[in-house]
Amino acid sequence: MKRVRTALAVLAMFFLIVAALLTSFQIAIYGDKEYGFYKDLYEKYHVTGELNMELDDVMEVTDYMMDYLIGREDKLSIETDVDGRRQDFFNEQDRLHMADVRNLFLGGLRLRTALVILAALVIGVLIIWKTDLRMLLTGAYSWALAVFLAVILCLGIAFFVDFTACFRIFHEIFFTNDLWMFDPAEDYMIRMLPEGFFSDMVIRIGLIFLGFLLAVWLFFRVWKAASGRTLRRKAVN
């Protein structure tokens, strides 16, 4: 029975870690309502020059695109001044690819909710079994975190060694077509979102995720220490 409880606790913690990762994606992408991080990257990678656009117009397109990605807009289409003329910023390939991206992103948010619910149910079962959650979850989190970080470390090394190759493999795994392969000479969206943009976004997501992991680790350590002090006081009395 002890092994079953430990396995369930590790599983619950693993679910919460994955949920934290998915939440980190959402915060990194949507945490700044003014999209200041995007603006900084556009300036860093000279996007306005590549597009022959004003920065305010690029930010307007960004705002619309992000509304579409999270489901607040139905169609990816916005007219703006780009490349010296008034036209739709997005083409048909953009719309088809971003429809897949939106489904993937919204699916990730639904998965996050499901994982949190499953973790809560597992913890609820452990409570019904009158388990000492303080000790069990603290150890389970460490085990789940070790496994998860080992996977992330391997992926991080791979991206550091060859970001372009990993970026390609990612798309080949999660997309069933080659619509993600854009030609910068023909497509404005890929000029607005160069490879460096995505590499910087990965770093941003990683830092937020590490913050989550550290916060949870500190919570368990404080909880364990506080519970230990309570038990010692009871023993003395």
Image (spheres, grey):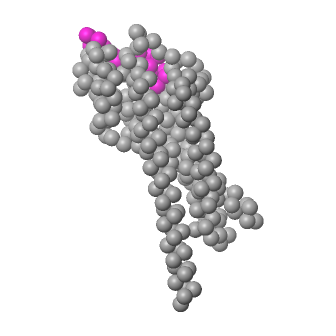
Total labels: the figure holds 0
Residue 114 visible in the shown view = no
| 109 vs 86: above or below | below
Q: Where is residue 104 in the image (x, y as percent from the top left)?
A: 53, 33
Q: In this view of the protein, which residue sits in the foreground, 153 or 56?
A: 153
Q: In this view of the protein, which residue sits in the foreground, 160 or 35?
A: 160
| 123 vs 19: above or below | below
Q: Where is residue 70 in the image (x, y as percent from the top left)?
A: 42, 36
Does the magenta segment cover residue 94? yes
Q: Which residue is drawn at 61% across and 41% down?
A: 151
Residue that protrudes farthest toward the right in the picture: 1
Does the magenta segment cover residue 216? no
Residue 38 visible in the shown view = yes
Q: Where is residue 9 in the image (x, y as percent from the top left)?
A: 64, 59
Q: In this view of the protein, which residue sits in the foreground, 162 or 230?
A: 162
Q: Residue at x 55, y 49 (%)?
A: 17
In the drawing, does residue 85 fall left or right of residue 5?
left
What are the residue bounds of the magenta stretch?
A: 83-98
Snapshot quadrant of residue 136 = bottom right
Q: Which residue is drawn at 40% across and 9% down?
A: 185
In the drawing, does residue 2 fall left or right of residue 184?
right
Q: Identify the image quadrant of the N terminus.
A: bottom right
Q: Residue at x 53, y 47 (%)?
A: 19
